Amino acid sequence: MKARQHKRDDQVHEFEKRDLGKDIGRSRSAVVIRPKKRSLPTSILLDSSLIGKLKEKAEDRGIGYQTMLKIILHEHVDDY
């Protein structure tokens, strides 16, 4: 019984120390969750009251204010 437990522990140890990311990539069996679109960082100055409104609306939706800003931009960029 101890020999079997020892062998299992060796297998667990080997599994836990190994990064399986490369193996999964080589197998081509993984599903891409995020498309490989490159996002570019940008910087804009916003009035603190506008950021406050974004934070309030974002909190109601359970998301961050920067994510809220991205949603608004994405939905309305073609309006201008």
Image (cartoon, rainbow, N blue to C red):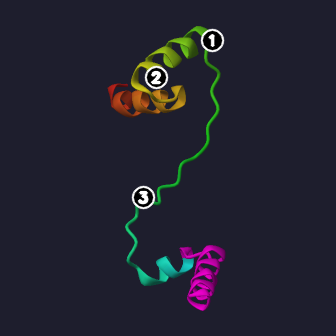
Q: Could you say whether the residue bearing mark 2 is in a helix, strand or loop?
A: helix
> Residue type at mark 3?
Pro
Secondary structure mainly formed by the magenta segment: helix
Residue pushed farthest bottom? 3
In this rendering, the label closer to the viewer, 3 or 2:
2
69 shown above or below 7 = above
Q: Is 59 on the left or on the right of 45, as rendered?
A: left
Label 1 crowd (10 A; few <14 / some 14-19 / many >=20): few
Q: Position of residue 14 (x, y in %)?
A: 63, 82
Name the residue rendered at 52%, 25% in the picture. Answer: 65
Kind of residue indicated by mark 2? Ala
Q: Which residue is mark 2?
A: 58
As drawn, the label of residue 19 is: none
Comes first in the chain, label 1 or label 3: 3
Position of the C terminus, as image quadrant, is top left
- Which residue is at 57% across, 83% downward? 8
Res. 20 image quadrant: bottom right
For residue 79, side relative to residue 53 (left or right): left
Could you tell me how far apart the alpha carbons at marks 1 and 3 are, in whole angstroms? 33 Å
Question: Which residue shows up at 49% across the image and 14% down it?
Answer: 56
Residue to which mark 1 is pinned: 48
Q: For label 2, count other residues whose C-alpha is less than 10 Å away and answer few (under 14), some (14-19) or many (20+).
A: some
Task: Name the quadrant of the N terminus.
Answer: bottom right
| Residue at 34% across, 31% down | 75
Please provide percent x and percent y for residue 43: 64, 32
Magenta stretch contains residue 45 = no
Asked if the magenta segment contains residue 3, the reply would be yes
